[in-house]
Amino acid sequence: MSVIRETQLNLRSDDRGSLVAVEGMVDLPFEIKRVYYIFGSKPASRRGCHAHYHLRQMAICLAGSCRFLMDDGDERVEHVLDRSTTGLLIEPMVWHEMDSFSPDCVLLLLASARYDRSDYIHHYDQFIELTHMKSRTLELVA
């Protein structure tokens, strides 16, 4: 399974303009408990640089573009998010970093839970250790 999971969002357009609506448990596989957005990031800035134990998120680039690095401990993939009609699903235990922000980038994130500091894994070495422990446990069970 690829670490990159894009979702095409439903676009409705007419002569007045366009609209995209996102509903929890319809357009994404979780209820939305928190919404936040990132803007004004310098192109060389690195954001994210963590993983979550439980949190699920969807990232939508409302304007401009940015690059994601997604890493599940086995697969490491770079992906450019640059369409307001595409959501990028960020699952638990996926290390994610964002960079290469365009000057007009507005990155919206929809989250499955409220902010919980204890759900963050901030150190990449710890993340790799945890993913490899999980892999070894699954091998023993199989």
Image: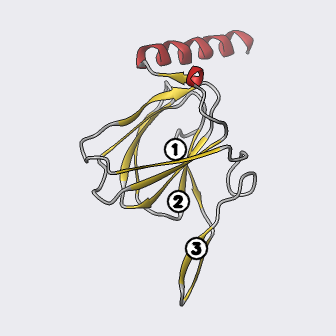
Q: Residues within 10 Å of mark 2 (few under 14, many from 20)?
A: some
Q: CA distance from mark 3 to mark 1?
A: 25 Å
Q: CA distance from mark 3 to mark 2?
A: 13 Å
Q: Nearer the viewer, mark 1 or mark 2?
A: 2
**In which quadrant is the C terminus drawn?**
top right
In this rendering, is residue 64 above or below 12? above
Residue tagged 2:
86
- State the image quarter where residue 13 is shown: bottom right
- In primary-sequence order, the first of circles 3 and 2 is 3
Q: Amino acid at mark 3?
A: Leu
**In which quadrant is the N terminus drawn?**
top right
Q: Amino acid at mark 1?
A: Ile
Residue drawn at x 54%, y 78% is: 18
In the image, residue 24 lies at what x, y percent?
72, 52
In the image, residue 96 lies at what x, y percent?
45, 35
Residue drawn at x 68%, y 47% is: 32
Residue drawn at x 53%, y 31% is: 94
